Image (cartoon, coloured by chain):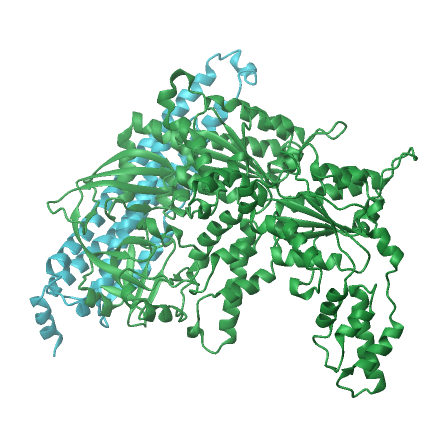
Amino acid sequence: MTVKTSNAVVMRGDAPPPTGSPQTCRMSLALMTELGANLVSLVQITDNFQQAICRLRVADSIFGNYIEYHPTVFRSWPESKEISDSKKTLLPVKCKECSSSGDDLNKENWRQPQTCDNNLTSTSQSCCNFELLNTTLADYVEVCVVTSIEHVKKMKNKLKTNSKYLEDICNNLLCNFGIKENFTVDFQVSLLAKLYNISHLIIKHCEGGECEQDTNAFMVGTQTVIRVTDIQSTERYTSGLSSTASPLGGLEEIARELIETVKIPVTLAGCLGKAAVRPVSGVLLRGPPGTGKTSLVRYVASQTGAHLVTINGPEVFGSRPGQTEEVLQKIFERAVLFSEEGLCILFIDEIDSLCPKTRPGEAMSDQNASGLLFNFLDSLHETLSLVVIGATNRPASLDSALRRPGRLDKEIMMNVPSYQQRVSILEVLIDKLSVGSDIDINKLARMTNGYVGADLTSLCHEAVYSAMSEVSSGSDMEERGPIQMKHFLSAAKSITPSTQKGSEGLIDAPPVLWENIGGLEATKLQIRQAIEWPIQHPEAFSRIGLPCPKGVLLYGPPGCCKTTLVRAAATSSGATFLSLSGAQLYSPYVGDSERKVTEIFQRARAGAPSILFLDEIDSIIGKRSDSSSQRSVQERVLSTLLNELDGIGIRMDDQVVGGAKVLEGDVCPDESGQCSRKRNSVRETLDRRNVVVVAATNRRDLLDEALVRPGRMDRILYVPPPDTQARRQILNIYTRHMPVQDVDLDGIAMATENYTGADLENLCREAALKALTVDLRADVVKMEHFESALKIVKPSLTGNMIQKSQPTKPWSFCPKEH
Amino acid sequence: MSSRQSLQLANDNGEHKLLLQLQKSFKIVQQCVTVWCVVLTESRPHLVTLNNLTEQFTSCYSTSNIQLAAITSQLPDVKDKLQQKLQEGVDAKLDVMQEKLSVLHGLCEKISKQCKYSTDLYTKNHVKLNLVMVTTATATRPSIADMLEWLQDTEQLFLQRYWARTYILDQFRLEDKSTHLSDNAIWSYDDKDIQKQFQEKLSYLSFFLEEKL
């Protein structure tokens, strides 16, 4: 019999009832008659989460179709593990029987469940299936005892020395229970089981009677012979029940590596023979926050079946001296207990707070905890089934003694996800949502440059919320549509990638299109070549063997839209855009400015591909002079900048991108069609992670030679003042939204020699103002207004200035040698 | 239809038999519960003595020889002898408790047997017994379904209490303080709660138990 939730009041307890008989399903008379049951029947209830065996009883409910049951004897559906609680409300879960009529069901599922009892929750599943069981008395039952970890050892001893005792207590517990093979009996609320220290009994095997059907259940009587085959810890058992093995996008490579690290020493213990020493007993995961370090460890634990013991760095600290060590010692002992039972992972989250770097002269109080951890790690060499995994986002502040081989031997870098990784993360996330057909994952992945896994999750949540807010504003809940691309796009606007949060250089620049810049066609092309192409077509660059430029210097007279050009390049390339100005950089503290430069480069690398824009670079860093003996801040900033641009390398712990291991997983399969491309793919990825420094100045002569050498500022582009043709186009753009009448733009363009783009904008504004001055109700701007405006607005450039800022010799592009 | 006629009808499908059996079962269970309480009350002074003895033993056990120097100079083996004596006392009391437990076991078995008879009788006749009929209560008696359920629940409850007591007594070690009965809740109170539960059900059954079927 199948009962739909919409047609009946179905109450499903989460745990066995605290009082009364545990294995009970109360059902109203009508349903019982329909099922053909009697007062002693056993029924198997199948819902979307698990199967349960219950004893049927009549419910005295006012509802004609009332069902209430507690899954005391249950079996979880392996496939239902992925259905998380939060999703239940979003996704109507379809049952096998009802999947044919799925559409009707979805609607029905949105109806609010009816009255709730005190400790019962209404299920959101769409239907439950009821099946009457034939019952026979069991002759022989094999069980696995689940007990708390402290009692596992004791019970195992008991099993060896006095198994009869264990079997008797199991018989007492199971007496009068209806069971089936592979079902578990939950005793967590039973007083007797608490005395016995048994939380669950897993039925491994049943024998009895003659009929051997699938629907056959067994009753345990006092005569039933029970054999205990295994002892398991409650913690491991319950974590196995609740663990969600949802795959992680883009982390397959690292996950496989970790799983191997955890598993191999145990599986190959025999082969290793005498040298059965764990090759790797500790792993350090490092990477920016939100890249999935913690979820990766959870995933690995669920995949390897290892028990996860977690230490949250700040959680173990106590107020009393010695309390921290006490708590830590207890956790270590627990971990060792679990490792005796099977695989165990000790996960230390935020390990940097537990083992901070010690500086001379600092208090020694924190070092006790570090010392304890070192001792523990050193003692692990003999234990094959215990792995310690530490996670941190500040590897630089870790005690270096922790990172030596023998303690945390292996370091795994968790990156800011690449484009391909973002695609797979989004695929995993979006797979869980009911989305419309117009979702373009590739486009979303392209948009979300510099986002980490947590940001992408947040993006999906935002999209769900925006879709839900539409529903709630609409009249009917049942008209709920799927989540569409527009929801994702609106969500993307409200999310700043976490790697860029609190960044110095993060700015909100209004987008500028190339078409909005008049003239300067040659310059535009050069800038696109230098900035846009390496980011958008890295494969073409690597095919030709052309290294991507690291820096571009724009110079030219003021007001000739150098800044606007950079903005347009940022808009069209879709890269992370960071900007640094002198005002942000200089601070009264010594060394602070240099730190800021390093930091902003680090952020730029995290969000790569990115453009780092240094406007008015001559004011930020000048030229190194020989005269002054004392080095100024500017010189120190310059040297930092030079190092960041093309120094010996990046400091290991600051590295956010890199490591060949990670890059292997980075290879884009969409280019794998051709072998030659495949070979270059690793290099392509390197290039794709490029940071382009774009600097603008109008005093080229003030810059240091070391900065403008090839390899740093590879391309030096002159942005000339607009010529007649360009001026005509600029005027066109500015008068686009202006009602002009009989205006000879060509004539104005001819007459505005030495006018810059900014001047021309001013001219148009003046002309429009003039028109309004004459008559406030004027609706057109005429030639005469322009002519009078020309008399006021004078060119900001002089022949001398242009002469000065012009390139002395034609520039040549010389790629950096590799 | 007179009550005689309706009973006649009931006789045909086994309801009468079942009611008779239920009446008998409840009467026996009622007796058992009374005896159960008496046994527990009787064992109370023994339990107090046992706790007393164990406490003495623990104190004696934990006293060092130096503290007893004044006495041991005259009576060198006083501690061992005292321990021996106390041990014997405890053993004797434990035997008494075991006896009481075996009485409780007998009661449990009686209840189980009655429960089994009634359930078996229902199972045998369930085809003939209409589900509506067995779930309908009359003015004088609760429904058969309810009565069967109560019987099963009572059986389970008493069995659990018996097993718990047995387990605790089994675990008893004089040297291990955590296994002593004085700390234990199950031995310390006299199952007042389950008595009360049963009494509540009995109040529904009072007419039925006195009815002449």
In this picture, residue A53 sits left or right of residue A547: left
Placement of the C terminus of chain A among the 4 image quadrants:
top right
What colour denotes chain B? Answer: cyan
Nearest the eye: B189 or B42 = B189
What colour denotes chain A? Answer: green
Above or below A468: residue A204? above
Residue A804's spot in the image, x, y percent? 86, 51
Residue at x-position 17% and y-position 56%: B118
Residue B206's spot in the image, x, y percent? 25, 64
Do we see residue B184 in this rendering?
Answer: no
In this picture, residue B196 sits left or right of residue B115: right
Residue B40's spot in the image, x, y percent? 34, 44
Nearest the eye: A159 or A557 = A557
Residue at x-position 78% and y-position 74%: A747
Above or below B183: residue A161? above
Nearest the eye: A187 or A191 = A187
Nearest the eye: B162 or A153 = A153
Residue at x-position 45% and y-position 77%: A476
Q: Quadrant of residue A12?
A: bottom left
